[in-house]
Image (cartoon, rainbow, N blue to C red):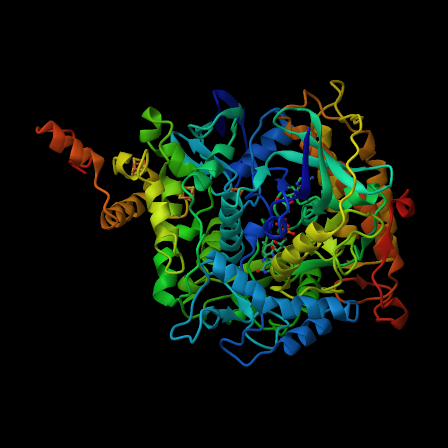
Amino acid sequence: MISIDILVVGSGISGLSAAISAKQNGSNVLVATKNIPTKCNSVMAQGGINAALGNLEKDSIELHIEDTLKSAHKLANKEMVELLCSNAPDTIEFLEKIGVPFSRLDNASSPLKSVAQRKLGGASSKRACYAQDYTGLKVLHTLLDYTLNLGIEIKDNIFLLELIKNSKNEVCGALFFNFNSGEVEAIYASKVIIATGGFGSIYSKNTNSLGSSGDGIVTVLKAGGVARGLEFIQFHPTTLKGSNILVSESARGEGGYLVDSKNERFVDELAPRDVVAKAIFDKINNREKVFLDLRNIKDITTLMPQELKLIKTYAKVDATKELVEIEPAVHYSIGGIAVDKNFNAINLKGCFAVGECSNALVHGANRLGGNSLLEAVAFGRLAGKKASDYPDSTIEREDIKYNLPLDTNYSNFDIYKAKEILADTLFSGVGIVREKNSLTDAKSRIEKLNIEKLKANGTAKYNTNLTALLELQNANILAQAIIYAANKREESRGSNIREEFPDTKEEFEYPIDVTLGDIK
Amino acid sequence: MKITVNEKSYNIEKVLTLLDALYKIKSTQDSNLTYDAGCRSGVCGCCSVKVNGKEQLACEYEPQDGDKIEPIKYYPIKKDLLVDKSSGYNLISKERAYLKLYQESTLEKTDESKTQIQTDCILCSSCYSACPVLEVDKNFLGPFALTRAYRYTADRRVANEKEIVDNIQKSAIWDCTLCGECTLACPMGIDPKADILQLRNLSAKHGYMDPNLSNMGFGGGFGFDPNGGF
Ligand SMILES: Cc1cc2nc3c(=O)[nH]c(=O)nc-3n(C[C@H](O)[C@H](O)[C@H](O)COP(=O)(O)OP(=O)(O)OC[C@H]3O[C@@H](n4cnc5c(N)ncnc54)[C@H](O)[C@@H]3O)c2cc1C
Ligand code: SF4
Ligand code: SF4
Ligand code: FES
């Protein structure tokens, strides 16, 4: 039984940023994560991280705020957006000083001025700092080296199950399934930071890492917290057809075009993602094919080595010579755990949430490319400090009563069948365009799967069927919560497009809140 | 077609990647088959395995009829293809490879290219699994950790270069036989062998000598030179 000051759940960029800042603020920190530290969405980020450094074009924090608010379609909180954008230059400075190997410009007047920047969709300037197209990989690994060398323990292969509360109803730790021992174990902490990432992988066509199943959001819901804005799910316009491997927006930022079957351009490639994804969706719905044309990008081999490799491996196409067929896929969870301006989870004293698992009201109805890595580092560091400074919850130990869903009478294949049906149902019924009927159908189809009654076969230790089931059970609850929120929003705004309500309505200028009670 | 995983054979349809094949097997034929994967796109380092004796990323490798799949070497095997990679992380803190002391430097494109390839490392441990020295010396730091050490020493912002150099003398740079197996195994085109050579030069600048050479000096005769012939 472990007991520490701060328990960070999740070892993506948000979790490690929070852990480092809490540790530097004097707290004793432990990072708990469900797999190895490099398995997260963070390593997959390609395009870049936003900061108005103005290294190549005129830019300012005000413009960054303006672009972010515009793309948010009135659903962002201005104060939080200001906090995010004004912290961005310091964030890059922090990353620069721990050794992130950014791409560079020659003859710069200062270290920060040497960071190369590119334009991403919806940005009025070249604002995304990058490391070729391996930005997330290089940021995460640098943070990992730093975390390990600061002496912060990373406990891997433990799966968050439940938050533990004391008699004053404060959060004072969490229960985990330890994959290596097969036991359920408690980690007590004076404060808990949830940084468990998004839930893209519960959809069939998605760009996310396997295991992005929104576990942290469901755990918070079960503990009495609130999920906010789940109806806003960002579809990325350009993923490889079939495999849904992402082709980053930087491909269009560097000059790539979108063309239809007639080889004609049909949309401003650098409009915000909701606009581009919808335009492509309409084409595909009309039985047309859509392609990305990257043949005209100069220096593509140095600017985007990863893109070329991915396209070659998964689409078997040489993008310097041929067109690349693409389709939109689920990419980013805009909604998440509702937090206040100190990243405190609403209704849960002692529990903080940050990164993609949270909704800190900075993305509104549509996230700008490059703003989520920024949120992960900037807010991750702020949340680490706030949690470290926050009054301690009293630790009260309790007996562990948790029944893992195991039973030798069940077939594990049912888990994968149910998972695939759930994922397809969400994509078709709660996709880019939804309507009342598709939402109602999806709801009843998912209910019929009786996922809560499934069990995994075998013993607990090293049982990947059991972890698949735990993720599926979370996906099941999340699916109901997403459908609830999407149903409530009887309008179209940003990434929530309702067939029968094409207009944006003033009365919906807030994200939908969901609690467990709403979906029971 | 047929593939075998740890001697057990499976019939599979033609699929794009080995990872697709493993998922198909797990979800329809043998749910106990255990392996790991995350990004499906060659950046998370989870899915490294050995195919016909050579390290591959399951998410990038296109399976062929008759392929023999095994777990990567030197880490404790948890189950089937799943190994415990956590000791790999400890190597990074053991050698203290990180930017501990920052010195202000305005980097340029040439600085970017100095560490660009090394920082592509996804910690898949393919190089580690391929390294023959680990067969005889479990304490050997191994290729990816040394590439990481080199990456920080080659960065003008890092003022703690000496400390890193001090930490890679024992069971590290001088124990490498420069066989190049790590370089052949790396899915990211990283060349740990070349990085180790660079670290040897750097160590010499800091006053370290190849202990194999000094042994030879003391013995006064024809000591074994591990670099001979390479
Ligand atoms: C392909 C791709 C490209 C992207 N490109 C960009 C880009 O260019 N710019 C940009 O700004 N954003 C980009 N994004 C988005 C960005 O990468 C993510 O939003 C961000 O990295 C999220 O970081 P995070 O730390 O919050 O979550 P993650 O990085 O997903 O980390 C979540 C962590 O929580 C752990 N965890 C989850 N559940 C549990 C549990 N039950 N128990 C214990 N631990 C758990 C996971 O193992 C993981 O360590 C991209 C995303 C993808 C998928
Ligand atoms: S070159 Fe050195 S580190 Fe690489 S495999 Fe050979 S002995 Fe190991
Ligand atoms: S150096 Fe290459 S083979 Fe070794 S861990 Fe890194 S990416 Fe994998
Ligand atoms: S699944 Fe991530 S490297 Fe293969």
Q: Does any portion of residue B42 appear in the rendered image? A: no
Q: In the picture, residue A448 is in which quadrant?
A: top right
| Image position of B140 with respect to A279: above or below | above
Q: Residue at x 89, y 45 (%)?
A: A519
Question: Residue B21: percent from the left, percent from the top?
Answer: 55, 35
- Residue found at the very far top of the displayed protein: A408
- Residue found at the very far left of the displayed protein: B221
Question: Residue A429: percent from the left, percent from the top?
Answer: 79, 51
Q: Nearer the viewer, residue A123 or A484?
A: A123
| On-image quarter of the C terminus of chain A | top right
- Residue found at the very far bottom of the displayed protein: A58
| On-image quarter of the N terminus of chain A | top right
Q: Viewed as shown, does residue A391 lie left or right of A447?
A: left
Q: Does any portion of residue A489 appear in the rendered image? A: yes
Q: In the picture, residue B184 is in which quadrant?
A: top left
Q: Residue at x 41, y 48 (%)?
A: B188
Q: Residue at x 45, y 67 (%)?
A: A295
Question: Residue A296: percent from the left, percent from the top?
Answer: 45, 71
Q: In the picture, residue B19 is in which quadrant?
A: top right
Q: Nearer the viewer, residue A500 or A369?
A: A369
| Image position of B134 with respect to A289: above or below | above
Count of picture labels: 0
Q: Viewed as shown, does residue A37 lie left or right of A455?
A: left
Question: Residue A85: percent from the left, percent from the top?
Answer: 65, 69
Q: Nearer the viewer, residue A190 or A251?
A: A190
